Amino acid sequence: MSSADVLLNIATAARLFHASDGTGFADLIIDGHRETWPLRSKRFQAWLRQQYYERTWDAPNPAALNAALNALEAQAQFDGPQRKVSLRLAEHDGLIYLDLADEFWRCVEIGANGWRIAEDPPVRFRRSAGMQPLPLPVRGGSIEALAPFVNLATDNDFVLVVAWLLGALRAGGPYPLLAMAGEQGSAKTVLSKLLRAVIDPSVAPVRALPRDERELFIAASNGHVLAFDNLSGLPPWLSDTLCRLTSGGAFSTRRLFTDQDEILLTAARPVILNGIEDIITRPDLADRAIPLMLAPIAERRRRPENALWREFELQRPHILGALLDAAGQGLHMLPRVRLNQLPRMADFALWATACESAFRPAGTFEAAYSNNRRAAIENIIDTDPVAALLREIMADGAQWRGSASDLLQIGANRSGWPKSPRALAGRLRRAQTFLRSLGIGIAFGREGRLGTRTITITAIGDNQLHDTVSTVSRVSDTGCAAGLKDPPPGLGQPLNFADDADGADAESRRQEPQSSSPPSL
């Protein structure tokens, strides 16, 4: 019997299947649990070599190993079933599965009646390089255990961060982008690492911006949460790509050594951005984001980061368990949730509203999300000279009509002003949605025999923003709710990095003046 035949005989112990793109996979039973590996992965090849060595006391030659892998791939593609292979999160038959990525390949199964640890789930997960395991979640915890570790100024910000984490527990999105800004020393990087560690820990929790779209989608193919650290700004191409990544986008490139074949990468991922400056400046991305401004931490209130992480590791199983409780509550309540009007991230808003009764009174998320969106709109308009000029024009009148050239001359001396009527019209269209939410309507038309292009700017009444995220129909079933009406301790003041063992010192710190709300992004 040849070496290739021996390898193929060994592989009969594996159950072969293929993904939608034709990639071959094998299910292996190792030490009593199931593992799933691509046929071309180092892990599967190492398993083949180990089994071959235990039978022959020799190693297969590369040619035999390659021939066996080619035959196994053909079996997986033509004889094996097609299955979906997920990374960290999967959904099946109304249930959510969270891969714990531990050595026993266990996952958490979340349903409307709660959650449990599943050792043989109906879904398949793959493991990418750098993935780290989640702790076994603990029941009966409170999401308030997360509050002492996050530098958030208000309870509204805390509610939005918890909602973002819950949104990241849905497979496929859409996911609002979490954008954090703040001066040096406001714990932006630490917060980014902490949030990723709650649901998708990695050897490299934060990274620099990718150089191109291809690198971004490769990163998205190998991690459920993407966190980009210490940014100075976003180039236009990246802003547009992140818009697609929040709800599901694709990137295609030519396969090497071919003229027509292409590789298609698809992904929808939760994304975290942080930087000192306002990172998001384009309205389309801002409409998909949750911006937060972090307050600086006073020097006397700091503590070593390794001490913070030690305490966080002790609380992480309880925090994860509380999130899973809220996700189960969300699955239970989601069929009953109704919004009078849907915001841009409608599925996220519905999901967060369904989950909120597990940790806050009904309507808390609605108010927090509405206020946050208004702050984002105000910031975008203040930083956009075109939108800011229109706001000034409409402050003194009910309507303005003219051509793009007329409007171009009015703001010609402003910094960052467009150089041509065409560019100005494009900027107006980009800001149109946000201006409408502030009561300013923009209409493009033609008039006269020659069909001269006109722009009509009109005051359309009161601010419409608060109607975007509408009142939720009240649901009487709140049996699973365990929310606190009062803000958790620590919110509304900078994260405590000081040693609070001394009670008198802690009391003196509580008497220090605190800002009532963070600066608007």
Image (tube, helix red, strand yellow):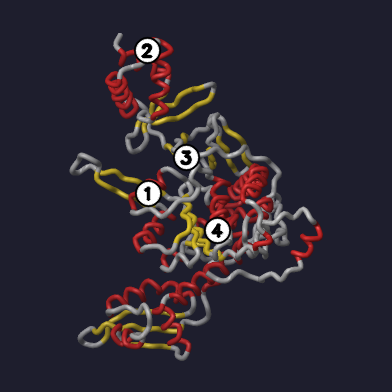
Q: Are marks 2 and 3 in contact (CB under 8 Å)?
A: no
- Pinpoint residue 432: horizontal percent, then vertical percent: 40, 74
Q: Are marks 4 and 3 in contact (CB under 8 Å)?
A: no
Which residue is pictured at 35% across the width and 86% down the height?
413
Is 500 situated left or right of 266 in this image?
Answer: right
Asked whether 387 or 215 is in front, the reply is 215
User: Which label's residue is closer to the chain start, 2 or 1?
Assistant: 2
Q: Which residue is mark 1?
A: 217
- Pinpoint residue 149: horizontal percent, then vertical percent: 64, 53
Asked whether 57 or 388 is in front, the reply is 57
- Tag 4 secondary structure: helix
Which residue is pictured at 50% across the width and 22% down the height?
30
Q: Which residue is mark 4?
A: 188
Residue 389 visible? The answer is: yes
User: Which label's residue is closer to the chain start, 1 or 3?
Assistant: 3
- Please tell me how crowded label 1 is: few (under 14), some (14-19), or many (20+) other residues with Cα within 10 Å: many
Indicate the amino acid at tag 4. Answer: Lys
- Please tell me how crowded label 3 is: few (under 14), some (14-19), or many (20+) other residues with Cα within 10 Å: few
Q: Which residue is mark 2?
A: 58
Up the image or down, 433 lies above or below 165; here it is below
Q: Which residue is mark 3?
A: 130
User: Residue most toward the right?
Assistant: 504
Asked whether 184 or 311 is in front, the reply is 184
- Tag 1 secondary structure: helix
Indicate the amino acid at tag 2. Answer: Asp
